[in-house]
Amino acid sequence: MRSALSYLVVEELDKRFGDLHVLDRVSLAVAEGEVVALLGPSGSGKTTLLRLLAGFETPDGGAIRLAGDDVAGLPPARRRFGMVFQHYALFPHLTVGENVAFGLEAQRWPAERTTERVREVLALVDLAGFEGRRPGAISGGQQQRVALARALAPEPRVLLLDEPLSNLDPALRERTRRELRRAIERVGITTVLVTHEQEEAFDLGDRVAVLHRGRLEQVGRPEELYEAPATRFVAGFVGRASVLRGEADGPFGEGDPVEVRLGPRARWPAVAAFAAGEGAQPVEMAVRPEALAMRTEPLGDGDRGLAGEIVGRRYAGPMTLYRVALEAGGEVEVLAEERGLTRAAAAQEPLAVGARVQIAPRPDTAPPPRIFPSEAR
Amino acid sequence: MTPAQPPPAEARSRGGMPRLRRSLPWALLAALLAWLVGYPLAITLVESLTAPAAGAAAADAGWSLAGFAEFAGRPDEWLALWRTLWISAATVVLAAAVGVPLGFVFERAEFPGRRLLGALVALPVALPPLVGVIAFLFLYGESGFVSRGVQAALGLEEPPWRLIGGGAILLVHAYSMYVYFYLFTRAALARLDAALGEAAAALGATPRRTLVRVTLPLLRPALAGASILTFMTSLASFSAPYIFGGGFRVMTTQIVSSKLNGDLRMAQVETIVLAAVALAGLGLLQRTNRPAGVAGAVRGVAPARRRIASRGARTAAAVAGWGLAILLLLPHATVALISLVPPGTWTTEALPPELSLGNYAAVFSEPERLRPVGNSLWMAIVATVAAVGLGFAAARGAVVRGGRLGKLLESLISLPWAIPGTVFAVALAATFSVDRPLALRFLLIGTPVILPLAYLLRNLPLTGRAALSGLGQLDPALEEAAASLGASRWRALRRVVVPLVRPALAAGAALAFITALGDFVTSIVLYTFETRPISMEIVAALRLQELGVAGVYGVLLTAAGAAAFALYGRGEVAA
């Protein structure tokens, strides 16, 4: 398993643009045939990482290994990494067929095999017979697939995708995403893709690497990122989460269950995402909206709830997202199935902005929320 | 799959290719351009500052301001400078007065023949200034059609007017330079977001208020650009003052006169003054007219042309449009007509009594008359090819290399645009009239090399800026795509960059070719009898009263200009 994981290896990769540290010693290993999505907000360094892999930028430090060889010094033309650009970068003066054949000509494939290969990859992306068209005369989705076919034609060792779907309108995006995933699966090629959309990363990536300010925050399967975020940034960036401040008593280790004090009476269960020593630790707890329950009954003695007032309500069909301002300060988001509130409460009064409520963790929530060291102090 | 396995050391040196090695070709190119463009100007500056005082021996020339003192002490020099400035300023105002309304009419109103006329109206920009000047001479000059017509109609003894002096120069300037305002206005209007006008209307603004408060302010950057172009062109204008000036001297004619009188020192001093004025004017205009960045103004859909509703009004617009176009194109039609008038047949009649192809036969059958055509052709072709090559290379360097070296390359290809042709001619004449190879000065004056070289320098901004804009519009991802597909840098250049920039290069080359073909301003200073170009032959023919022959040359230049302009238009569309 270790050797499989080390097909494309990025070691301590470092890149600065002037004073800006765009990549801070990033390490990442990709297995042969695996699809890894680089996810992060704009400016996180994900595109720079992709461009370093492609060879368009030279690293200031670190190594890029492919099957054990250092390729960081190779110019892009000798790297044999296929790339699909954000705006496709199809050559406008060449036909679709000539675009796809471009990489084969550069490798001096014989004409006959070139024609055959062009036909083959165009068929792979469902564009059989499009050879004679001009890039300007086909739709955006088709252009995207031509770009994919062009990148795949010379049988690259790695496929790089830079925001492959961002240029498409939302209606087309989902269908193109399915097609893209199918094509990658059929070829079985090692793939690194950049995206700022979580849904895209989760759908396309076998694993997802979250980048923030040039640092790699966490790499893992989508479920791992969502259920066990390693950092507060990941907790907030992947999925929705509200942050509650509280205290937890040390010592505890990473992954240990802990109890967090959120108020005079409220004690909520959580899992530590970091290790801490003896004594009370100020912590921040990231809670998912679906892990919270809301009630209108007044607080009883020994109740674990937090009192607050509804300040916003967003109805989204099967469920409703509430924004609740807590008496103790701060705001949380609570996801409620509209009729999932206790029947009695729903019958008494509809939950509207201004209603006073109590927030508590859902008893059935698995896994419990994660806590992180407080950044406030 | 066989992964490439270069030794790591080699791999490193390739990836992190030393900046120096990568920069060296560009540095050499910059040095070559500096020698071509900057060196002659520097030599001229130095020599104007080492001018010996009158009467002193040339040998003991040290640094001295004697030349400039002499300049400052002569009222005729101050007068020429003053005239240059006010003529240029007045030209801007007049050209704007003609060009801006014309641009509005052709961009905003729809009437029959709009497209064809719209293109024809822009034609004067592609014609050598000398052709425009002789066209004016044939039409409005003492013995031109209009003056003869007026004279005959009123039964006058004398021609009703003489086309001479500042007014005449201004007329020709306005006529040939309104095109800048016309083209810039149309382009800016076409880019204007229709929603802005609609927003103003929705806010209760009248069309007049919308024009004054919204449209014109948004046109400001375009109008500023046209103003700079017109001012600089007028400052450098030579043909019109030379033919129509008479005793009315401006700086360019003053320089050439000094040079032809053998007073090279004074010519150099005048040259430096004119160059300084040009650069100062450029700097000043660029500063005062810095465009306000209105990002939203160039998005969205351009307003639809208003199809004039009433039939009568539509006819009126068409008639006005056609009338205006005919008025503007009449001079060139006149050149064609004059070229058909046999020598000596047209004396006092209002219209030529006889027309024939005799002048064409004369030009094409007599080797000595055909020779200037051949000269101009080969020199223009050589200069254009070289200018395209150098301009593209420098523009590529500016884009690829960037940084200070890139900026330097960009400045070097742009500089000749700001420097009047006369200045360059005098600078080249001074620099390459001695044979001092160690100082990188060679004896080129009197050889066939000097004129193509001068044309090349004058053309560099045309081809270089065209290449720069073409390369600037190129998505860098295209080259990266070629590289990631395994193409070498040369292959990417040949298969991707050059084909995509070709329309822009062709447009630049077309303009450069026609400029070189009709060049007069540098030719008059640098030509030899052996290499005399068409323009010199036109002037010679005018002097000999061979108007028909001058007309033939004018028609040839006009035809070449129209062809180049058509090519330019195609390039613009493709780009």
Image: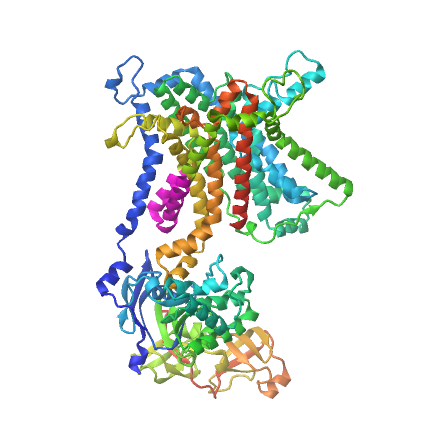
Q: In the image, is residue A252 above or below residue A199?
A: below
Q: In the image, is residue B498 above or below residue A274?
A: above
Q: Is residue B554 visible?
A: yes
Q: To which quarter of the image does residue B382 belong?
A: top left
Q: In the image, is residue B327 above or below residue A66?
A: above
- Farthest front residue? B365
Q: To which quarter of the image does residue A69 belong?
A: bottom left
Image quarter where the N terminus of chain B lies is: bottom left
Query: Which residue is depicted at the point 67% across and 21% down?
Result: B353
Which of these two is toward me, B239 or B358? B358
Query: Which residue is depicted at the point 45% across and 65% down?
Result: A100
Q: Is residue B238 visible?
A: no
> How many numbered circles does the render carry?
0
Which of these two is toward me, B410 or A221? B410
x, y percentage for residue B332? 59, 30
Q: To which quarter of the image does residue B206 belong?
A: top right
Which of these two is toward me, B574 or A218? B574
Q: In the rendered structure, does residue B389 fall within the stretch colored magenta?
A: yes
Give the magenta range.
B385-414
x, y percentage for residue B218? 57, 44
- Farthest top residue? B157
x, y percentage for residue B168? 57, 22
Q: Is residue A265 left or right of residue A351?
A: left
Q: In the rendered structure, does residue B324 fall within the stretch colored magenta?
A: no
What's the image's color scheme?
A: rainbow
Main SS, magenta region, reads: helix
x, y percentage for residue B143? 61, 18
